[in-house]
Amino acid sequence: MIDSPQTRARWASELADRARAYWTPARTEELARGKALLLPPAEAAPLLRALGLLRQDASMPPPQVRKYFQINHMVALLGPALRELRARHPTIRLLDAGCGRSYLTMLVAWCAKHRWGHRLEVLGVDRNPAVIAEGRRRTELAQLDDVVRFEVGALDALDARAAWQRAFGDGAAVHGVVALHACDTATCDALALGIALGAELLAVAPCCQAELARAWATLDAGGAAGAFAPIWGTPHLRRETAAHVTDAMRTLLIRAAGYDVLAMELVPSEHTRKNTLIRAIKRSSEPRLQAGYADARAAYEALRDATGGAGIALAARLEALGA
């Protein structure tokens, strides 16, 4: 049991020594195969061990190599947006909404502390107390507990704001909201939360987008007619198409709220089918005055109507916010 700061520091130091001995330049080059590594095993051993990617002897088992490259890629995708935040804020504060195991924000926090030399603080919020306890354990092992904190809570704007104030105090700005594989409408909750808090950066990797597919199944069962009816009535196509249309609707609604939005491949599809990252950067504090953003809202409505008239939760959340 690693149960004190002194014991954890000794554990991390011993592991780092083993990693430096194990990960010779030749071994590191063999692992990298020409790719740039943001998290070299010889430098990031306590973090990678805390995430379950290194053995105690600092070696990396073959099944974990794929995950290792995935997490390097995730951080690289957020690099441009994080550089913008670093240029504007001496301390960057992120909210990890529905944080789960909090891979992404632990990685970003480690890079900020050890690679970029920039203060970055993270609050992870999740409904599951066991997940929060595990996040705290991992963060302590990775020696990031000075910059990464966790709270049990819902993705409700009031609850999240209260948790944020407990962590950082009144008046502390939320610079970014991230959500990695928040299930179904929880991604919409995270996006609406970020917009409500005025976050400059939104980054979500959606998962299990079932809301629109359920609505289409109801249309099919009710005998509704329309050009999209062949999709409604075919379960496989309904599920697959609904996921992509949901993300397209999300990008339009985020753009209508004043953000530049990009949907991109998070990791190669052979690793996971849930491989879309939606990244958005706020460009306008008055989106209703920007013609392009108004056009995005009209495009959402046109897409909604063309596919059967069923909207998504994010639209309702933003309407309630007046956004």
Image (spheres, rainbow, N blue to C red):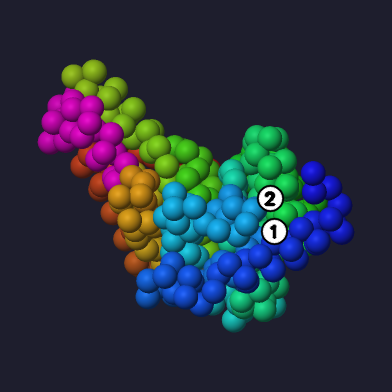
Q: Residue at x 40, y 37 (%)?
A: 208
Residue beneath disc 2: 138
Relative height, residue 79 to residue 275 (above, below): below
Q: Residue at x 80, y 56 (%)?
A: 8
Q: Residue furthest bottom?
A: 87
Residue at 42% x, 42% y is: 207
Q: In the rendered view, would you say 93 is above or below 218?
A: below
Amino acid carrying label 1: it is: Ala
**Residue 238 lies within the magenta run:** yes
Residue 218 figure quarter = top left
Q: How far across and down, in percent of the image, does residue 268 sit?
A: 33, 56
Residue 142: mark? 1
- Contact (Cβ within 8 Å) of mark 1 with mark 2: yes
The secondary structure type at the circle numbered 2 is: helix
- Tell me if residue 5 comes above or below residue 43 in the rendering: above
Mark 2 closeness class: few <14, some 14–19, many ≥20 residues within 10 Å: many
